[in-house]
Amino acid sequence: MRNLYAGGRSNVLAQNGIASTSQPLSTLEAVSILKMGGNAVDAAIAASAVLAVVEPGSTGIGGDCFAIVSMHNKDPVAVNGSGIAPKKMNLEFLKKNNINKIELTSPHSVTIPGSVHAWYSMHQKFGKLDFEQLFITAENYARNGFSLHEVEARTWKQNEKKLNQYENTKKIFLPNGRAPKFSEIFKNIPLANSLKKIGKLGAKAFYEGEISKDIINTLRVLGGFHDEEDFANQITIFSDTINSNYNNYKLHQCPLNGPGITVLIMMKLLEKFNFESMDATSYNRYHIQAEITKICFELKETQFGDPKFKKIDFDDFFSDSFINKLYKKIKINNVYNSKKAYVTSHPETIYLTVVDKDLNTVSFINSICHAFGSSITSKNSGVLLQNRGVNFRLEENHPNVIDGNKRPLHTIIPGMLTNNKNKPILSFGVMGGQYQPIGQAHLLQNIFDFNMSIQEAIDLPRAFALNGKLRLEKSISLQTSDKLKKIGYNVDYEQDSIGGGQAIYIDRKKGLLIAGSDSRKDGSAIGY
C-alpha cells in the first residue's frame, strides 16, 4: 500500500469495465460508452475524440495514432494509423526548393493525418455501436465549450507565441488574443462541425470531402505541396504485433514505423542485470536505464524507418549475440558517450486504455507531435495539423530519410502484456515524446522487478537520457543527482515532469480490473 502521508493516488478497481486517460472528461466518456453497451474499441474511439477537443495541445483529428487491440481473448492486433508524407516530399525535391530543414511550424512538417482513418477502420473491424454515437460528446464539447484543466492550461500558455504565428490558429486557439486560462470555457465550433460530418459519413468525410480540401487549400497558401491524391493514399495498417518473452509473459509492440522494437530490445538488456538488491530510486538503477537508453537510441536513430522503404529483419536485433554486443557497452562506473543517438525532435502525446466486461482490451495512443502540432489550423474546418514530418531525416540513404508516401519513424507506442495463453493482463502506455520506450521499460520494471502496484509504478520518479543530458524529475534526491554526476553525467533537473502514463492490469483469477492514471497530467481512471 502507498504511504498515505506522501500524497498521491489510489489504484482504481472495477469488475465490469474500466478506462484510464489523460483527461477526466475523456475517461468519463469511455465509461459512458461502455455502460451504454459499447465495447472497448467503441469506448477508446469516443474517448480519443473527446481528447481531440479538450487536449488540443497534445492530440487532435489532425494527427496520428497507433493501437494494440485484443478482442474476444484472441491474439493482439497492431493498428498503424500514422500518416504518410505528401508524394512530392522527397530529398531531391527539398534540395531543389532550397529547403535544408523541416521547421516545426512549416507546412512541410505536416504529414497526412492518420487518426480518423484508423478510428473508422478499427470501428469497421471491431466496433459495436453506431460510429456516429462515438462523436456526440466530443462534438458537444467543441460546440458548447468545456472548462480548461490545469496541465492543459499550462501547456497552452507556454505555447502562446507559437499559436500567434498563423491567423486561423490565432483566431480559434487564442480567443481574446491570449491563451485561455485554467477553468475558462473554450470552444472550437468549426471543429464541432467537422466531428459531426465524420460521425455521419465516416473516414470519407475527412479524406474525400470538404475537410481535406480545406486542409489542402490552407497548406498550399503557406507553400505546402499536399494534394487530394495524398489524402486518398492514406490507409490504416492492421498486422500482427512484434513481441518477445518478458518475465514469463509476452510483451507486445506495434511494428515499425513505430519504435516499439526499441522497448523489446531494452527489456532484453535489462533482464541481464540483477535488480533484487537494488532500490527502485537508486542512482545505479537510473544509471543502467540511462545507458540502455543511449545504446538503444543509437540503434533506433541509425537503423530504423518505414519498413516499406527498407526491409528490416527483426530477428537480427533479438539474437543473443546482438544483445550481448549491446550489453558489453554498458559499464557500471562509466557513461557511454554516444554520438549517434541524437533525435530530430522530442514531441508530446496522449495515451489511453480501456477494458470492457468481456475483457476486450485496447491500448491506444494519439498525437499531433509537438505541442499544438505545426500550429497550422485549416481555415474553415478547425483542424489543427500535426508536424510529424520533423521526425524525418534529411540524409541520403538513411532508413528514415524523407520520401513521398513514406511514414516517418514515430515516437508513439502503445504496449500490451499477455499471459501464456496470449490473453491480455496489462495494457499500458507512457507519454512524453522520445521518453516513451524507456518510460515503458521503467513502468514494467516498477511492476515486475520492484513489486509495485499499478499506480505506484506510474508515480515513481523518472529520469531520461537524451541528446547528451540526463534529465531528472525534481522528486529525485540531490544525493542521487550528485552520484550520477560523479559517474560522468551532465545532469539537469526538469522544470516540469517527464511524460505521463496510464495502465490497466487484468487480474483474471479474481475477475478484477486495476487501473492507474498519471498525476503528471490532468487525467483519471474510472471503472464500474
Image (tube, grey):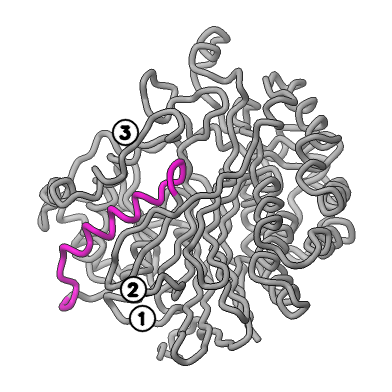
Magenta-highlighted residues:
255-277
- Residue that numbered label 2 is attached to: 446
| Percent coordinates x, y for residue 133 in the rendering | 82, 64
> Which is more foreground, mark 1 or mark 3?
3
| Percent coordinates x, y for residue 62 in the rendering | 69, 43
Measuring 61% from the left and 45% from the top, which residue is drawn there? 64
Image check: 444 left or right of 449? right
- Residue 33 figure quarter: bottom right
Query: Where does the N terminus fall, quadrant-wise?
Result: bottom left
- Residue that numbered label 1 is attached to: 452
- Residue that numbered label 3 is attached to: 302
Q: Which of marks 2 and 1 is nearer the N terminus?
A: 2
Question: Circles 2 and 3: CB distance less than 8 Å?
Answer: no
Question: Circles 2 and 1: CB distance less than 8 Å?
Answer: yes
Q: Earlier in the sequence, mark 2 or mark 3?
A: 3
Measuring 50% from the left and 65% from the top, which residue is drawn there? 501
CA–CA distance in space, label 1 to label 3: 35 Å
Foreground of the two, 289 or 418: 418
